[in-house]
Amino acid sequence: MQATRKEIDFNNLGFDFIQTDWMFLSDFKNCEWDDGELLPYGSIELSPSACILNYGQGIFEGMKALKSKDGRTTLFRPSENAKRFIKSAERLVMPPFDESEFLNAVKKVVRANEHFVPPYETGGSLYIRPLMIGTEPLLGIKPAKEYKFIIFCSPVGPYFPEGFSSINLLISKKFTRASLGGTGFSKTCSNYAGTMKPATEAKKDGYDQILYLDSVFMKYISEVGSANFCAIINDTLVTPRLDGTILEGITLKSVLTIAEKKFGIKTEQRDISYLELFEDSCTETFCTGTAAVITPIGSITYQHKTKTFNNQEPGVITKKLYDTLVGIQRLDIEDEFGWVQILE
Ligand SMILES: *Cc1c(COP(=O)(O)O)cnc(C)c1O
């Protein structure tokens, strides 16, 4: 949708794309990136034989700009996204985009579109999407020699417009998301096309998403489509070991730090059998991500067995972690870890 700022109802935003005024674009040619520039948001021209269109050579990131109560615009740990972007590029043999250039470009785009950052009271944010694609026309399967780095953004509503509430997940042994030695750890465009069918089927059966298992044993929890998984088992915060099949979430990393350093909760990164989730010792589960923030899981179903957590109410620890994370992000709580960058 195309809209001017005046037409946007910041109180009723969802997660649909809304065009803003400016995007950033940089080209890689003859082995180097050009300086890049802000351009009015618009279409780009691509050859039908561009590498991204035929072989999916593309990577992306997801970040948010938020308003604090006093109207400042903030970014949350943007250097972590810049570093992960380089790691993703490396996996697909794409040229790295310098960390400080990445941060400068993100700030430029947000500043240019600052009037699209939803006000503090709405709970919304400006979702930022850095994207890199192989644009060289080619036929043989090989890394492109030409690339585009693009940053666009879109105002989005709060993830919980009707209040903090939980989702229902289905464990599938029919589909997996990633395999050992593959690209699961990186944010490659091609990791997501394959999750659309499992998600569509799960939704048709009344679930919000799939909870994926590992692809070797079909036994250990992997993650939730586009969010990481955590469980409280015997009062310990447990999350799957990052074995290369799981996206290394910045929200997850932050939640582990908050749990340990702020609340003294023990954390463990280990293999978690899905069977553990059905035991009484597993008292809360939730997932984490830039879009999902911290989303409580109300129930998990495997075949005909369903475990319901806290009558579908968010667990006590889940709620505490959510309030603290969002509080830090919006500068309502002191940023003791130095995570928040204020846009000058
Ligand atoms: C982006 C993403 C996440 C969450 O990562 P954050 O850095 O917390 O946003 C988790 N899983 C997948 C598959 C993702 O693409």
Image (cartoon, helix red, strand yellow):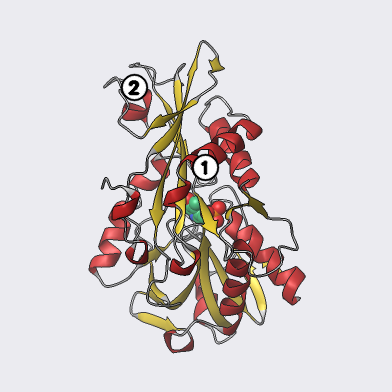
Residue 221 appears in the figure:
no
Task: Identify the residue under disc 1.
Answer: 111
The response on whether ligand 1 sits within 8 Å of label 1 is no
Q: Position of residue 18 (x, y in %)?
A: 32, 49
Marker disc for residue 50? 2
In the displayed structure, 1 sits above or below 158; it is: above
* Figure label count: 2
Q: Quadrant of residue 252?
A: bottom right
Residue at position x 43%, y 84% in the image: 312
Q: Foreground: 67 or 6?
A: 6
Q: Position of residue 305 (x, y in %)?
A: 38, 81
Q: Say which element carries label 1.
A: helix
Marked residue nearer the N-terminal end (2 or 1):
2
Q: Amino acid at mark 2?
A: Ala
Q: Quadrant of residue 257?
A: bottom right
Q: Say which element carries label 2.
A: loop
Q: Position of residue 196 (x, y in %)?
A: 31, 52
Query: Is residue 78 found left or right of 124 in the rendered image?
Result: right
In the displayed structure, 234 sits above or below 255; it is: below
Query: Is residue 97 found left or right of 197 in the rendered image?
Result: right
User: Label 2 neighbourhood size at 10 Å, few (<14), some (14-19), many (20+)?
Assistant: many
Q: Specify the farthest residue to the top.
A: 30
Marker disc for residue 145? none
Q: Foreground: 275 or 38?
A: 38
Residue at position x 67%, y 65% in the image: 256
Residue at position x 37%, y 39% in the image: 21
Residue 78 appears in the figure:
yes
User: Label 1 neighbourhood size at 10 Å, few (<14), some (14-19), many (20+)?
Assistant: some
Marks 2 and 1 sit apart, C-alpha to C-alpha, by: 31 Å
Q: Amino acid at mark 1?
A: Arg
In the displayed structure, 242 sits above or below 323; it is: above
